[in-house]
């Protein structure tokens, strides 16, 4: 299988791709683990289809054009990753509630000439927290680091939809932070929503002391030279630490040293991928097979 292909390359070899046809769209995309994971789920169910990485240009209109061409190529659907999640939401004829509220979609289903949009990132986070750390988000207080980013805001909205007890949004001061907090308060009267400036050590310490789950949705940790998104001394053994970065990071190592239950971005990737599989095929995915394909 090619590392990735353009829509033109896909059209040229479409007859070699067995149905059902699926893929993941992004830019860059050659690094995506989704094909290995989704093909493992398909094989576990005896489905002999195809799943390819599709490179989409970043030019205006390129994503919507790609979707129209995938419809003509009789694709069942695609996953969507950066930087096209907002464009995927706009391209959908129908959307689930999380897509509507967040403005972001990561799963498209093509049915009867129409495009349906779903956001499985948030529910995937909830599932991963429960499966790997036994944490029911509804009963927990959640601190989200980097809440203004696309992933952070989507997870914050999911936490509010789930009805978590307390929801603290940590970010460098930005106008969008107040807007997000107001939106979350409108979604759920059950969740107590607060704003925490990431540069304020006292407020960060107070937020960490109240939190059961600490989520790193910031980019800090992509490089080992990055500072921790939260001071290591604020981590406690009782914390569940959920780092959305898919490789081992200083935050994950610090959390394990303290004795925290730690999840990383691969755990969420498996669960959101399993939910995508269910939207396409209408049957539960073998999440264990998916996890083994990318984690072991």
Image (cartoon, rainbow, N blue to C red):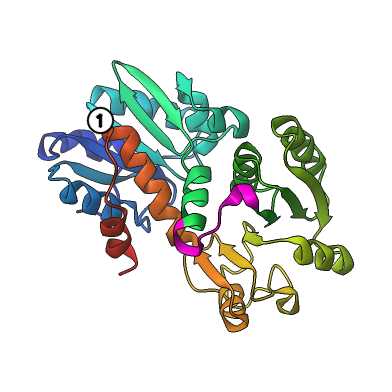
Which residue occupies the foreground of this view, 164 or 25?
164
Residue 216: image quadrant is bottom right
Position above or below: 137 against 250: above
Percent of width and height locating residue 81:
46, 45
Say if residue 3 shows up in the picture: no
Query: Is residue 137 a member of the stretch shown in magenta?
Result: yes
Quadrant showing the N terminus: bottom left
Percent of width and height locating residue 157:
64, 40
Which residue shows up at 14% across the image and 39% down it? 17
Say if residue 155 shows up in the picture: yes
Which residue shows up at 50% across the image and 74% down it? 248
Percent of width and height locating residue 176:
77, 40
Which residue shows up at 77% across the image and 40% down it? 181
- The residue tagged 1 is 75
Quadrant showing the C terminus: bottom left
Query: Is residue 120 a member of the stretch shown in magenta?
Result: no
Dominant SS in magenta = helix
Which residue occupies the foreground of this view, 277 or 220?
277
Q: Which residues are magenta?
A: 131-139
């Amino acid at each position: 299988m090619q590392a990735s292909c353009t829509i033109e390359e896909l059209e040229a070899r479409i007859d070699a791709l067995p149905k059902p046809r699926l893929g993941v769209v992004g830019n860059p995309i050659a690094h995506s683990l989704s094909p290995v994971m989704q093909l493992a789920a398909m094989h576990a169910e005896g489905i002999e289809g195809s799943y390819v990485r599709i490179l989409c240009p970043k030019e205006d209109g390129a994503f919507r054009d790609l979707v129209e061409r995938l419809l003509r190529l009789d694709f069942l659907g695609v996953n969507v990753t950066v930087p096209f999640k907002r464009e995927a939401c706009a391209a959908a004829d129908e959307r689930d509630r999380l897509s509507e509220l967040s403005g972001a979609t990561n799963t498209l289903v093509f049915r009867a000439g129409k495009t349906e949009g779903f956001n499985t990132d948030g529910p995937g986070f909830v599932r991963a927290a429960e499966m790997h750390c036994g944490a029911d988000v509804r009963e927990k207080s959640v601190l989200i680091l980097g809440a203004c980013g696309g992933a952070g805001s989507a997870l914050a909205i999911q936490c509010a939809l789930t009805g978590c007890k307390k929801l603290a949004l940590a970010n460098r001061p930005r106008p969008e932070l107040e807007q997000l907090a107001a939106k979350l308060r409108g979604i759920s009267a059950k969740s107590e929503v607060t704003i925490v400036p990431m540069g304020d050590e006292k407020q960060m310490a107070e937020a960490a002391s109240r939190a059961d789950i600490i989520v790193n949705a910031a980019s800090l940790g992509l490089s080992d030279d990055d500072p921790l998104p939260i001071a290591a001394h604020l981590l406690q053994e009782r914390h569940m630490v959920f780092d959305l970065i898919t490789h081992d990071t200083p935050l994950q190592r610090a959390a394990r040293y303290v004795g925290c239950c730690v999840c990383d971005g691969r755990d969420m990737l498996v669960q959101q991928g399993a939910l995508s599989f269910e939207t396409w095929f209408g049957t539960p995915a073998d999440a264990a097979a998916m996890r083994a394909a990318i984690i072991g």
